[in-house]
Image: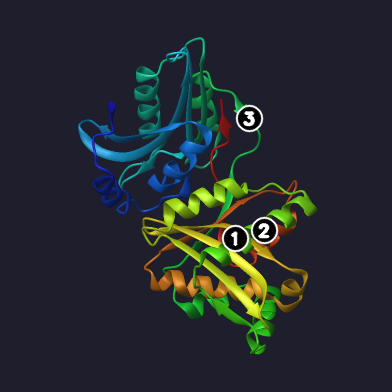
């Protein structure tokens, strides 16, 4: 078994068609994500089709940066590669790593950052160690919600307290869910989010990144921005980004009044129904951890998804 990576051989349209065929995908491997991030971080994207024994097996998006005619070179691979049906074994990943390091061998001045889109295991750890990589931090954790289930099943899977808060919000007929996207509303959302983030000192994407993501995802109809409004006051907002047959909860905001009213529960439940209408099959609720955001993890787990522990960050 041998692997080869063909870089930048597809048009963006051809890439998107193949990306949509992947049974599972994520935001960090989406073409639009690279379009948003690269200008901010002075990076460029590289898009590869992985072939094993001559047959297409997977796809990978890498961001890279270089200085002084590539004397200093950095490769970033977050939550990849992604595999077509019938592929994705540890052996496939091993062959991919061999091909990657053959094209970009270790040398002075070259740095790597890799988060494999594989469940963390002793075997994965041994493989990365054998290639000279060091594990940094804990495995990446997220919660995935299967939207192929019917609405009744999704509702039944909600934890009792989460469902109770939702029911309370649904009884308040003055709470209005709005999915209209306007520049003015989005700016207000960014202001509220920035103030909340500064006041509570939590990790989260920057306002510059959220602005860039909107520019990249909105033109293709791949952005969902929702609000809950009561008496002309915004109580909660959420930003969802679609990629292939998947979607990701990027960020949300809620006022104190919104939390008391259960506005975020109401908004996310409506988001599930909207995404199902769009043909989205799974919702990634975003990274979670037990260190700085234990309450957020508990809130997301109560939505009935499954916790997945992917590979750690390797350098």
Front residue (pair 257, 232): 232
Q: Which residue is mark 2?
A: 191
Q: Which residue is mark 1?
A: 187
Which of discs 3 and 2 lies nearer the camera? The answer is 2
Residue 297 shows in the view = no
Q: Residue at x 60, y 40 (%)?
A: 139
Query: Could you tell me which secondary element the residue under label 2 belongs to?
Result: helix
Q: Residue 178 vs residue 171: left or right?
A: left
Vertical arrangement, residue 163 with respect to residue 135, above or below: below
Horizontal and vertical percent position of residue 203: 69, 46
Q: Residue 107 vs residue 257: left or right?
A: left
Of pointers 1 and 3, the one earlier in the residue sequence: 3
The furthest residue to the left = 54
Query: Could you tell me which secondary element the residue under label 1 belongs to?
Result: helix
Vertical arrangement, residue 189 with respect to residue 113, above or below: below
Vertical arrangement, residue 76 with respect to residue 84, above or below: above
Of pointers 3 and 2, the one earlier in the residue sequence: 3
Which of discs 1 and 3 lies nearer the camera? The answer is 1
Residue 264 disc label:
none
Callout 3: few (<14), some (14-19), or many (20+) C-alpha neighbours within 10 Å? Answer: few
Horizontal and vertical percent position of residue 51: 26, 33
The furthest residue to the front = 184
Q: CA distance from mark 3 to mark 2?
A: 33 Å
Q: State which quadrant residue 231 falls in.
A: bottom right
Q: Residue at x 58, y 36 (%)?
A: 312
Residue 136 disc label:
3
Q: Residue 288 vs residue 1: left or right?
A: right
Callout 2: few (<14), some (14-19), or many (20+) C-alpha neighbours within 10 Å? Answer: few
Callout 1: few (<14), some (14-19), or many (20+) C-alpha neighbours within 10 Å? Answer: few
Q: CA distance from mark 2 to mark 1?
A: 6 Å
């Amino acid at each position: 078994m041998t692997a080869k990576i063909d870089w930048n051989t597809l048009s963006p349209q051809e890439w998107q068609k193949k990306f949509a065929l992947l049974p599972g995908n994520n935001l960090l491997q989406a073409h639009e994500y690279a379009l948003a991030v690269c200008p901010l971080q002075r990076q460029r994207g590289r898009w590869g089709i992985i072939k094993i024994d001559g047959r297409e097996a997977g796809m990978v998006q890498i961001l890279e940066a270089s200085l002084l005619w590539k004397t200093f070179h950095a490769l970033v691979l977050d939550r990849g590669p992604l595999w077509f049906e019938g592929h994705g074994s540890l052996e496939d990943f091993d062959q991919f790593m061999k091909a990657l390091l053959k094209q970009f061998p270790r040398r002075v001045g070259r740095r790597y950052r890799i988060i494999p889109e594989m469940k963390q295991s002793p075997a994965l750890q041994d493989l990365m160690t054998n290639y000279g990589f060091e594990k940094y931090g804990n495995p990446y954790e997220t919660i995935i919600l299967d939207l192929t289930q019917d609405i009744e099943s999704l509702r039944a899977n909600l934890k009792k307290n989460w469902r109770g808060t939702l029911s309370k919000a649904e009884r308040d007929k003055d709470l209005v869910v709005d999915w209209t996207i306007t520049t003015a509303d989005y700016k207000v959302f960014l202001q509220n989010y920035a103030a909340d983030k500064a006041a509570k000192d939590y990790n989260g994407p920057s306002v510059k990144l959220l602005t860039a993501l909107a520019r990249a995802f909105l033109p293709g109809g791949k952005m969902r921005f929702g609000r809950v409004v009561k008496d002309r006051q915004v109580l909660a907002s959420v930003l969802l980004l679609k990629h292939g047959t998947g979607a990701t909860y990027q960020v949300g905001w809620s006022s104190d009044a919104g939390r008391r009213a259960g506005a975020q529960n109401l908004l996310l439940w409506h988001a599930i129904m909207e995404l199902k209408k769009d043909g989205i099959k799974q919702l990634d609720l975003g990274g979670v951890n037990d260190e700085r955001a234990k309450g957020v993890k508990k809130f997301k787990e109560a939505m009935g998804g499954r916790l997945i522990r992917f590979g750690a960050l390797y350098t």
